[in-house]
Image (cartoon, grey):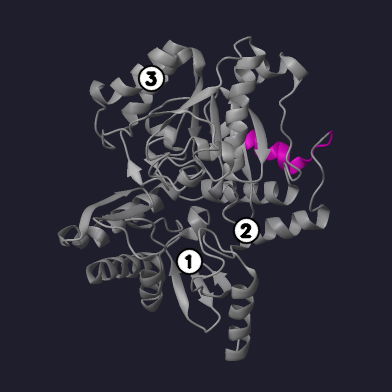
């Protein structure tokens, strides 16, 4: 792309596009990407960037992978889309069987949707409709964790942290729910009883009104990149059973290997009543999400008013997306992905370790293919983003977090370049 074309592209972007979490009247600087292969993004000016974000955590196999390309092309020759009301097709049925086989055995119904936020909306609606159908319509609220994040649509926003989350502007409009403190117990350590006191009290006092508890198992993602004890989930499952509320796990960010287990719930050996999946489901190729639920939840809903779950996205079960998801999962499981993720954890830990000695760093932490430098103060994204690009890497901080969640295929040399750039930029702030 020549200089004139580059300038035209940027001008068109400024004139017409509203980017996420950005001003439309004073748009931020953006970097035009014209191609992507492996773990690299190629900019319009010829520069290449090592992608530490895996396109918001979903491109686990990197870009332009032949197996995923082939799945798209082969399905495109058959059909790109067909409505899911009253019809079905092989990619959807095969994908559903794969998901029910890989997830805990009690989760045997799959509802497809278009994005992670919608998968959460579906989960919340399932919980509400289940209790209404079973004669307990008063169970209309949820318990979520402080510093949690579950999406940007209205139902999902309502169970995100109401203070530190990015949705405080909508607080007066959102449904009101209950929030327990984020677990203080660290990953790999036991969860003391004191960490369960607050949520136990909430359930004890309000269980007659609570439809479900929703959490991100082990890793709280966009709410703070916090890693907490799997033992918390074991105790939470017991509490939900004791107080007769459903348990929802949001694995949109953690599913498909990110924490070193295929699903983060495996760290605890705990089975939720409802499970949300997305992001890496298609390897970053297409938007697709899934909400799985137990037979009890499905049967309860269908035995009640209407006899059906009341939700139906237009692009539900899109054949192209389902075929790509099948290829992505089969590719992941055909490789020693656990070794790759463990190597990434080891290399991220070693590469980020020097940041611990910097005065503006609160903590450095890693888990699976996640590396985090937490600063003492928020970063200026518009100032910091070009600093990473100048060093040949793509890292997009938020708040006080400089973090990466790279593709699993990233080699050691690229991991080293990525972590070195992170430490250099943080040291310069």
Give x and y (percent) for residue 93. 72, 36
Q: Identify the secondary structure beneath mark 1.
A: loop
Residues packed near mark 1 inside 10 Å, few (<14), some (14 to 19) or many (20 plus): many
The residue that mark 3 highlights is: 202
Q: Identify the secondary structure beneath mark 3.
A: helix
Viewer-side label of 3, 1: 3
Q: Which numbered disc flags the more N-terminal residue, 3 or 1?
A: 1
The residue that mark 2 highlights is: 67
Viewer-side label of 3, 2: 3
Q: Quadrant of residue 418?
A: bottom left
Q: Name the residue nearer the viewer: 215 or 13.
A: 13
In the image, residue 95 lies in the stretch drawn in magenta: yes
Viewer-side label of 1, 2: 1
The residue that mark 1 highlights is: 39
In the image, residue 7 lies in the stretch drawn in magenta: no
Quick one: quadrant of the N terminus?
A: bottom right
Q: CA distance from mark 1 to mark 2?
A: 16 Å
Q: Quadrant of residue 112?
A: top right
Q: CA distance from mark 3 to mark 2?
A: 48 Å
Q: Which residue shows up at 50% across the image and 58% down it?
A: 21
């Amino acid at each position: 792309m020549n200089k004139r074309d580059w300038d035209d592209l940027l001008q068109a972007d400024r004139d017409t596009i509203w980017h996420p979490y950005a001003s439309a009247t004073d748009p931020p600087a953006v970097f035009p990407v014209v191609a992507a292969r492996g773990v690299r993004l190629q900019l319009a000016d010829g520069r290449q960037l090592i992608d530490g974000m895996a396109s918001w955590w979903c491109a686990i196999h990197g870009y332009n992978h032949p197996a995923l390309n082939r799945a798209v092309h082969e399905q495109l020759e058959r059909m790109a889309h067909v409505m899911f009301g009253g019809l079905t097709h092989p990619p959807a049925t095969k994908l559903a069987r794969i998901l029910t086989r890989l997830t805990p055995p009690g989760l045997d119904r799959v509802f497809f949707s278009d994005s992670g936020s919608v998968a959460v909306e579906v989960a919340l609606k399932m919980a509400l409709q289940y209790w209404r159908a079973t004669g307990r319509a008063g169970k209309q609220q949820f318990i979520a964790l402080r510093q949690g994040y579950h999406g940007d649509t209205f139902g999902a926003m309502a169970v995100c942290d109401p203070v530190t989350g990015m949705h405080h502007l909508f607080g007066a409009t959102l449904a009101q729910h209950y929030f327990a403190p984020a677990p203080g117990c660290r990953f790999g350590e036991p969860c003391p009883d004191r960490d369960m006191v607050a949520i136990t009290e909430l359930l004890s006092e309000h269980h007659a009104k609570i439809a479900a508890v929703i959490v991100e198992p082990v890793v709280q993602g966009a709410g703070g990149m916090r890693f907490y004890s799997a033992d918390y989930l074991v105790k939470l499952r017991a509490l939900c059973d004791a107080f007769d509320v459903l348990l929802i796990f949001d694995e949109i960010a953690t599913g498909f290997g990110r924490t070193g287990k295929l699903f983060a719930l495996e760290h605890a050996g705990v089975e939720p009543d409802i499970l949300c999946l997305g992001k890496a489901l298609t390897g970053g190729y297409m938007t697709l999400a899934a909400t799985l639920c137990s037979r009890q939840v499905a049967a309860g809903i269908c035995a009640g008013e209407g006899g059906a779950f009341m939700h139906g996205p237009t692009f539900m079960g899109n054949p192209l997306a389902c075929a790509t998801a099948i290829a992505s999962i089969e590719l992941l499981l055909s490789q020693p992905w656990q070794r790759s993720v463990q190597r990434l954890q080891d290399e991220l830990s070693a590469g980020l370790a020097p940041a611990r000695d910097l005065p503006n760093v609160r903590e450095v932490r890693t888990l699976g293919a996640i590396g985090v430098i937490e600063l003492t103060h928020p970063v200026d994204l518009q100032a910091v983003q070009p600093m990473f690009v100048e060093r040949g890497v793509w890292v997009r901080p938020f708040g006080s977090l400089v973090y990466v969640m790279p593709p699993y295929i990233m080699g050691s040399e690229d991991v080293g370049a990525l972590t070195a750039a992170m430490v250099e930029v943080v040291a310069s702030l």
